[in-house]
Image: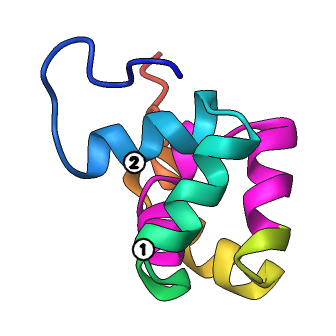
Amino acid sequence: MLNFNWDYCEGVETIIRKMVLGNLEDFKELLSKYSEKELKEIFLNNLHRFYGKDRSFWKVILEVSNEEIKRKSDESFRNTVTTRNFP
């Protein structure tokens, strides 16, 4: 089993690392330890850290709709900020 706490971070950071870097056993542990609602909230609040297969996998497992992702993305600073072009 991987050590997801390599820099002594606790809580949500460790959960996100398990969600992104973990294997099937880690996923089973997360799903048994935390409610689907808690994991869904963590996933939506940290969408910017999930890409490709990871995002698709957790979207299906946590039953997250496209509308929820769009709404959260629209609220997210990282996804809605634009750089102003100064001439």
Q: Is residue 53 magenta?
A: yes
Q: Residue at x 46, y 32 (%)?
A: 83
Q: Are marks 2 and 1 in contact (CB under 8 Å)?
A: yes
Residue 87 is labelled as: none
Instruction: Find the distance from the CA under tag 2 to the CA under tag 1.
Output: 10 Å
* Residue position marked by numbered label 1 in the rendering: 34
Residue 48 at what x, y percent from top left?
54, 44
Q: Residue at x 41, y 79 (%)?
A: 38
> Which residue shows up at 12% across the image and 21% down it?
8
User: What secondary structure is found at the residue carrying circle 2?
Assistant: helix
Relative to 27, residue 50 above or below: above
Seen in the image, is 5 located left or right of residue 60? left
Q: Residues within 10 Å of mark 1 (few under 14, many from 20)?
A: few
Give the residues drawn in magenta, as a range: 39-59
| Position in image of residue 60 (x %, y %) | 85, 71
In percent of width and height, residue 61 lies at: 78, 71
